[in-house]
Amino acid sequence: MYTLARELLFKLSPETSHDLSLDLIGAGGRLGLNGLLCKAPAKLPVTVMGLEFPNPVGLAAGLDKNGAAIDGFAQLGFGFVEIGTVTPRPQPGNPKPRLFRLPQAEAIINRMGFNNLGVDHLLARVAAAKYRGVLGINIGKNFDTPVERAVDDYLICLDKVYAHASYVTVNVSSPNTPGLRSLQFGDSLKQLLADLARRRAELAVIHGRHVPLAIKIAPDMSDEETAQVAQALVETGMDAVIATNTTLGREGVEGLEHGDEAGGLSGAPVRDKSTHTVKVLAAELAGRLPIIAAGG
């Protein structure tokens, strides 16, 4: 079935294939059909960030930006579902085409640009979903918000999603929003994390529960920069780090059609970079914070 579906989807543009797949998974979820198409995964429970996951394999943010198919993905056996990245206001993202297949390298380049329908729309979809498992909500800033005011967008989103998320991921590592990755470094990162920690403490009192905060980082930092990020996460009381987002590097896709397109590279070519970042984080954190591995 997979081979046939892949062949059919590859006859369509990458973004059309993505949207169609999302629609089908969402429809299957509403009809309760998706669970019939796959074998239930083995129970491999793990407790991370104070949350109990039925298994450690989850859906990363980016596939379902607007929460359109939460129930559908849950029925496929994921141990958790992360939706987003979502911004305070709806935005269309970058001009099309903005998604490119590199099948020879088992890779994709995207420059989507946080296209989403806004946090209020996402929360309406969360409210409509039947899923009661671990739900992560990934938040970002609007394209036209100056990076100096990015914290405002993160705080708006945190305020709105807090009561509805099992955990919240702060995306400071997308390469497709100008200036965003600068928030991963030095005083900019520490100030952002400190502001988020303060607001989270206030929200915990209001809502009577602690919602973990995870930070998603890029694979393109030096080991020293990655170590500095790890230290900042510990100092500001963050709960986890997600490693990693897509890479701006082009190792493994040189000379391929679309290999020089602007955007973030994901898939097999980023595996070594993301794994290396996980190793650096593990050495620096020494068990003080959990690491959620992604990429590759």
Image (cartoon, rainbow, N blue to C red):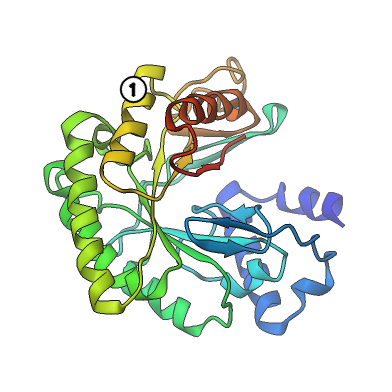
Please report the residue visible at 78 percent of the width from the left and 72 percent of the height from the top: 35
Please report the residue visible at 24 percent of the width from the left and 54 percent of the height from the top: 197
Q: Secondary structure at mark 1?
A: helix
198 or 135: nearer the eye? 198
Where is residue 248 shown, x and y percent of the image?
44, 26
User: In this rendering, is residue 196 above or below 100?
Assistant: below
Please report the residue visible at 32 percent of the width from the left and 74 percent of the height from the top: 120
Quarter of the figure with residue 123: bottom left
> Is residue 35 in sight in this rendering?
yes
- Looking at the image, residue 4 sits to the left or right of residue 238; the answer is right
Screen quadrant of the C terminus: top right
User: In this rendering, is residue 147 above or below 81?
Assistant: above
Screen quadrant of the N terminus: bottom right
Q: Badge 1 local density, few (<14 within 10 Å), some, or many (20+)?
A: some
Where is residue 156 shown, x and y percent of the image?
21, 64
Where is residue 74 shown, x and y percent of the image?
65, 69
- Looking at the image, residue 112 sits to the left or right of residue 81; the answer is left
284 or 59: nearer the eye? 284
Quarter of the figure with residue 236: top left
Where is residue 3 shown, x and y percent of the image?
85, 49
User: In this rendering, is residue 148 above or below 55?
Assistant: above
Q: Which residue is mark 1?
A: 225
- Looking at the image, residue 40 sits to the left or right of residue 104; the answer is right
